[in-house]
Amino acid sequence: MPKIQTVLSPMLLQLTNLTGKTVVVIDILRATSSMCVAFAHGAQRIKPVSTPQECITYAPQGFICAAERDGKPVEGFAIGNSPFSYMEPAIKGASIAITTTNGTQAIEMSKSASRIMIGSFLNKKALCKELIRQQQDVILLCSGWKNNYNLEDTLFAGAVAKELQDEFSIADDATIGAIDLYEVASRDLNSYIKKSSHAHRFITLGIEKDIAFCLQQDIYDLVPILENDFLILPESNLIASIT
Ligand code: 3SL
């Protein structure tokens, strides 16, 4: 039976050998949710990068350049990290370069894994189906906030692990805790998430509507993967995402 493990902060990733494993990068608010939105709206590929300086170098090649820091769009960039920005007609067929405070850094840190996949509540069912099909050890990597633990990514890790627990063996206490937390919180996920520090940050910034959007479950039947440093949809997903 393959194993499932949860890494509660990118800082803890150094304790885990990623060789031969699939890493699911999780940044519910909002990077991995927005990436799923972009693909659902026809984005061709996404280049995750670490810094705004690197991101803007993709502009001359016709990329849409997106940058977020501390929840806010970075000045000088076409868009930030709101899922609603990735529903615009310009997204269809686009190449996007993106840098965010935590999510794109977590992708960068996972590169020694054999596969990297993008997870969010928006594509949870499709993701779980693909993980079961692959039968490979899975690391659920919570992007957190500036290397700190956060509730929303842990809850999603719990939701995935709960779904997979009959097919995978649970390899650590972080996963057991995440499942238990999800069981409590899922009675009313929207209310529970309001306790989180990132939800308070969003309220201060006036962008709470992004939270409700990102907590919707299973609205997209697609799983972005990292291939040659670009996030793409594998062929099988492309058919499912054409709307
Ligand atoms: O850190 C990230 O990757 C972002 O998702 C943070 S925010 O939701 O855009 O504030």
Image (tube, rainbow, N blue to C red):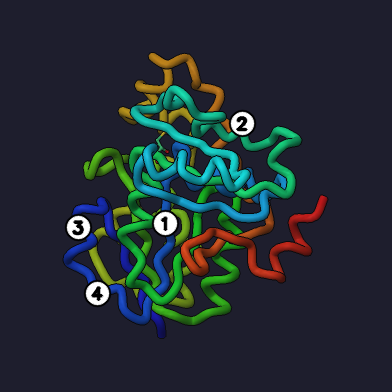
Label disc, if present, on residue 25 of the rendered structure: 1
Label disc, if present, on residue 85 of the rendered structure: 2
Residue located at (59% from left, 44% from top): 63
Q: Distance between the residues labelled 3 and 1?
A: 14 Å
Among the two numbered marks 1 and 2 on one chain, the one whose residue lies closer to the N terminus: 1
Query: Can you say whether 36 is above or below 2 in the image?
Result: above
Q: Do the residues labelled 2 and 4 touch (CB within 8 Å)?
A: no
Q: Position of residue 159 (x, y in %)?
A: 46, 54
Find disc 4 in the rendering and name its residue: 17
Residue located at (75% from left, 35% from top): 89
Label disc, if present, on residue 12 of the rendered structure: 3
Among the two numbered marks 1 and 4 on one chain, the one whose residue lies closer to the N terminus: 4
**Amino acid on which disc 2 is placed:** Ser
Q: Where is residue 194 in the image (x, y as percent from the top left)?
A: 40, 26
Residue located at (36% from left, 22% from top): 201
When asked about the image quadrant of residue 200, the answer is top left
Among the two numbered marks 2 and 4 on one chain, the one whose residue lies closer to the N terminus: 4
Q: Distance between the residues labelled 4 and 3?
A: 11 Å
Residue at disc 2, secondary structure:
helix
Q: Position of residue 94 (x, y in %)?
A: 67, 47
Q: How far apart are marks 1 and 2 (CA)?
A: 21 Å
Query: Can you say whether 43 is above or below 215 in the image?
Result: below
Among the two numbered marks 3 and 1 on one chain, the one whose residue lies closer to the N terminus: 3
Q: How far apart are marks 2 and 4 (CA)?
A: 36 Å
Instruction: Locate the N terminus by quadrant.
Output: bottom left
**Amino acid on which disc 3 is placed:** Leu
Image depth: mark 3 or mark 2 in front? 2
Residue located at (44% from left, 80% from top): 136
Q: Image check: 225 left or right of 68? A: right
